Amino acid sequence: KLDYQMKVSDLDTRGLKIKANQKTRYLLDGEEELLLAELDPTRIINGCASYGQRTALTQRKLQDQYDLVVFLLDTGARYSEVAEVPWSAIDRMDWKYINLYREKVGNEGNLTVTNRLREILERRFRETNSPYVFASLDDPSKPRGYATKGIRNAIKRAGLNADHLVKRYGKFTPHSLRHKFASRLVQG
């Protein structure tokens, strides 16, 4: 039993070890830029028409992937939370916060919107008729759902899972974007 008058610095933590099954991978210096460049919807893509000549569906998929990754980087939210966020959870008056429900832990809270996320949200709101920020490609009345193949491919193209990086830091996955947000908070 802990005495509530006790300070954390007074606790004897010698011998305590955190047991981890895997390494916690996050973006290293310069890797965010590499990843976003690989997700840039205007980039040249082998076997794909140039930016202005792509089909609306192809362009939407590419833009969704880029926007979703920025949303994840700037909020620290889980993929499933972002993929299903409705417009009703966004402060569309001032664009300053997002009320996010976290199903995994059963709570909700307000997250601050960064300037780059604000630009993305404002653009997406102007361009949509869906109740969701990220709507399903098949049915705009439904949320996007779990579709990470394009993001995983961008991670691979950016070289974030090169053998030497995986050995040292662990494998980078879309969930690692959440770790990047947490590492920024700790560093701040």
Image (cartoon, rainbow, N blue to C red):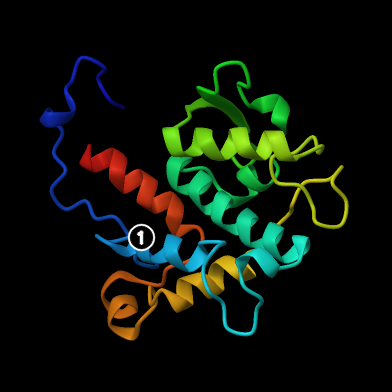
| Residue at 44%, 41% in the rendered image | 74
Residue 58 in sight: yes
Vertical placement of 43 versus 78: above or below? Answer: below
Q: Is residue 105 left or right of residue 178?
A: right
Residue 49 lies, with reference to residue 42, above or below; the image says below
Quadrant housing the C terminus:
top left
Q: Give the SS element for disc 1.
A: helix
Q: Nearer the viewer, residue 82 or 14?
A: 82
Q: Residue at x 43, y 58 (%)?
A: 176
Q: Residue at x 76, y 39 (%)?
A: 128
Q: Quadrant of residue 163?
A: bottom left
Say left or right for 34 vs 7: right
112 left or right of 186?
A: right
Q: Is 98 drawn above or below residue 70 in the view shown?
A: above
Furthest-front residue in this view? 52
The residue to which callout 1 is attached is 33
Density class for disc 1 (Cα within 10 Å; few <14, some 14-19, many ≥20) is few
Total labels drawn? 1
Residue 25 seen: no
Q: Position of residue 164 (x, y in %)?
A: 28, 82
Percent coordinates x, y for residue 98 in the rendering: 57, 27
- In the picture, the quarter occupied by the N terminus is top left
x and y percentages locating residue 149 in the rendered image: 63, 70
Q: State the image quarter where residue 94 is shown.
A: top right
* Nearer to the camera, 5 or 38: 38
Mark 1: amino acid = Glu
Instruction: Report the residue at 74% width, 54% height from top.
Output: 145
